Amino acid sequence: MTTAPATTVPATSARHSARKVRLRGERSPIASVGLHLTLIVASVIAVFPVLWVLLTSLKPAAYATTTDFFKETTFENYTNLIQNTKFLTWFGNSLLIAGLTTLLGVIISASTGYAVSRFRFPGKRGLMWTLLITQMFPVAVLIVPIYNIMAGMGLLNQPAGLVITYLTISVPFCAWMMKGFFDTIPREIDESGQVDGLTPFGTFWRLILPLAKPGLAVTAFYSFITAWGEVAYASAFMVGEDNLTLAGGLQLFVNQYGAQWGPMTAASVLIAIPAALVFLFAQRHLVTGMSAGAVKG
């Protein structure tokens, strides 16, 4: 008669213990169901307003405030918006202003962030504090003094006035972020550029900027969204239908007697397309750029 090896029970216990350890980090079925239900509810809440606007833009005016989304679906709101309003003019004005703000915002923020990160010069600390403090003031406080400045410079009702105004919003934040991003790039790269005979600008342009694409993407995205979706300054500084941006043009669809939901929702859908395209272009750099810029900002 043979007997089982003495190591059988300990080995079995060890396998059970290992299995328990593996299962300890796994969620129970109830927890998994709860998590998925929470994610589904959150997704529905996030998507519902966008879907509501899209479906309302495809309904006749008679059904604009009803829940009959798929009844008499039509593109009439879009055709009327483009043919019977100045929407294309507003769109072009906004595109021009947002494009210039994005281009100048990237250039100024990148150069300012690099200078603050790499060089020592008189007033450096004061400049950094100025960039930080300017972000503390709300639009309601700044709109009157900026209006007076633009009026004195003759820039009211001019795209240049809005571009300069939007740069005062985007550049301080983006310069701080770019400074933090440049701090994460080793200074040895700058030194290698100097050894190769590059000027400080050449080092910045040829060696540092290619490594700073995530930060530049975030700067471009923030500058574009700032100019594209801003309402207060655009409404105060621009008058006349031919000079309005999209923010001011949409206000023409609302008056004291009601709102024209058809053209307003159609315009909202068309306005969202450029912002979505810019986001899709920059999305793979957004997380990297913002997290890197926050390390030593």
Image (tube, rainbow, N blue to C red):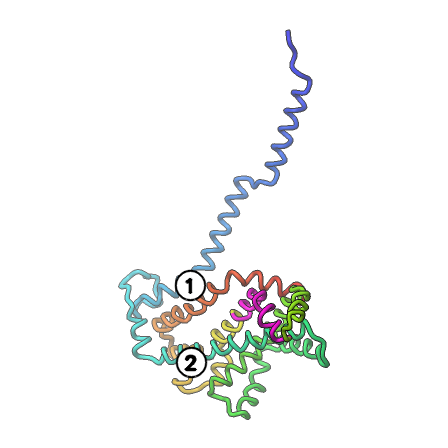
Name the spot of residue 208 as percent of width and height, x first.
60, 68
Q: Is residue 188 above or below residue 145?
A: above
Determine which quarter of the picture holds residue 277.
bottom left
Reply above or below: 293 against 235: above
Instruction: Tell which circle, 2 or 1, labels the residue nearer the N-terminal end.
Output: 1
Q: Is residue 96 left or right of residue 125?
A: left
Q: Could you say which quadrant of the image residue 213 lies in?
A: bottom right
- Which residue is located at x 47 percent, y 87 percent? 158
- Residue 136 x, y percent position in the rendering: 63, 75
Q: Which residues are magenta?
A: 200-220
Closer to the camera in the image, 165 or 251 = 165
Which secondary structure is most common in the magenta stretch? helix
Asked which secondary structure carries label 1, the reply is helix
Helix, strand or loop at mark 2: helix
Q: Nearer the viewer, residue 272 or 184?
A: 184
Q: Position of residue 201 (x, y in %)?
A: 61, 75
Q: Which residue is mark 2?
A: 93
Going 57% across and 85% down the picture, which residue do you hit?
146
Which numbered marker is on residue 158?
Answer: none
Q: Which residue is mark 1?
A: 50
**Quadrant of the image for the N terminus?**
top right
Looking at the rendered structure, the number of numbered marks drawn on it comes to 2
Horizontal side, residue 191 vs residue 219: left or right: right
Q: Amino acid at mark 1?
A: Val
Amino acid at pointer 2: Asn
Image quadrant for the C terminus?
bottom right
> Residue drawn at (35%, 61%), measured in percent from left and top?
67
- Residue 134, position in %: x, y? 63, 78
The answer to which quarter of the image holds residue 130 is: bottom right
